[in-house]
Amino acid sequence: MNVIKTELDEVLIIEPRVFSDSRGFFFESYNKARYRAEVIDKEFVQDNISVSKKNVLRGLHYQLEQPQGKLVSVLEGEVFDVAVDIRKGSPTFGQWTGVVLSAENRRQLYVPENFAHGFYVMSNTAIFNYKCTAGYRPDDEHTLLYSDKSIGINWPCDKPSLSDKDKEGLSLVDLEFYLPTYQG
């Protein structure tokens, strides 16, 4: 397994070791002991799968009272995946990193607790897998506007397909009282 640091220290790209031959391939998508020793010492408690069509943008979401760390990957298709540091007082507050995740490259991205997360579907469809460190609580979810100019995410699209919730996301400045604090 190869672990790659991103511009945001705690956000990691993981490239699992893949065993391929003429019949196909095999790789461990998660091994608790190995990931805890080599990548992140976190307990995952919930797995989710979403299916999205081309041009769909989901995010940028986070939970405040029960923050979720996420280990994400793509089982089918290709997405541009983004993490944003929204921790007040963090040296990288308001900065983002993005990576292409696909069924072909088999990469994973670890998005720590207290980061906003979202993705844009570049293929006809995408099956997206999330491993989460906390359960989903809809009453605790907040949405950072995907197009917030103060963050300046360079999405590979002009007019994505958005849910009503994502269309109504707030800018970082408008979420000031609903942001986590950096613990150092």
Image (tube, rainbow, N blue to C red):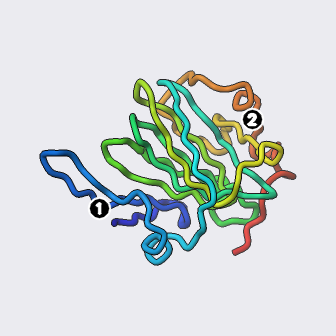
Residue 108 % position (x, y):
44, 54
Residue 1 % position (x, y):
34, 66
Indicate which disc residue 147 carries: none
Query: To which residue does mark 1 refer?
Result: 17
Residue 34's image quarter? bottom left
The answer for how far apart the CA atoms under marks 1 and 2 are is: 37 Å
* First along the sequence among labels 1 and 2: 1
Residue farthest to the left, as pictured:
22
Residue 123 % position (x, y):
40, 28
Amino acid of disc 2:
Gly
Instruction: Report the side of 85 relative to 10 (left or right).
Output: right
Eyeballing the image, is 129 above or below 114?
above
Q: Secondary structure at mark 1?
A: loop
Q: Residue at x 31, y 42 (%)?
A: 104
Amino acid of disc 1:
Arg
Q: Secondary structure at mark 2?
A: loop
Eyeballing the image, is 122 above or below 45?
above
Disc number lying in front (1 or 2): 1
Residue farthest to the bottom, as pictured:
37
Q: Residue at x 69, y 65 (%)?
A: 90
- The one of 125 and 62 positioned closer to us in this rendering: 125
Instruction: Report the side of 165 relative to 6 (left or right).
Output: right
Mark 1 is surrounded, within 10 Å at the Cα level, by few (under 14), some (14 to 19) or many (20 or more) other residues, namely: few
Q: Residue at x 12, y 46 (%)?
A: 22
Query: To which residue does mark 2 refer?
Result: 169
Eyeballing the image, is 181 above or below 62?
below
Question: Where's the C terminus, which quadrant?
Answer: bottom right
- The one of 160 and 133 positioned closer to us in this rendering: 133
Instruction: Report the side of 21 relative to 132 (left or right).
Output: left
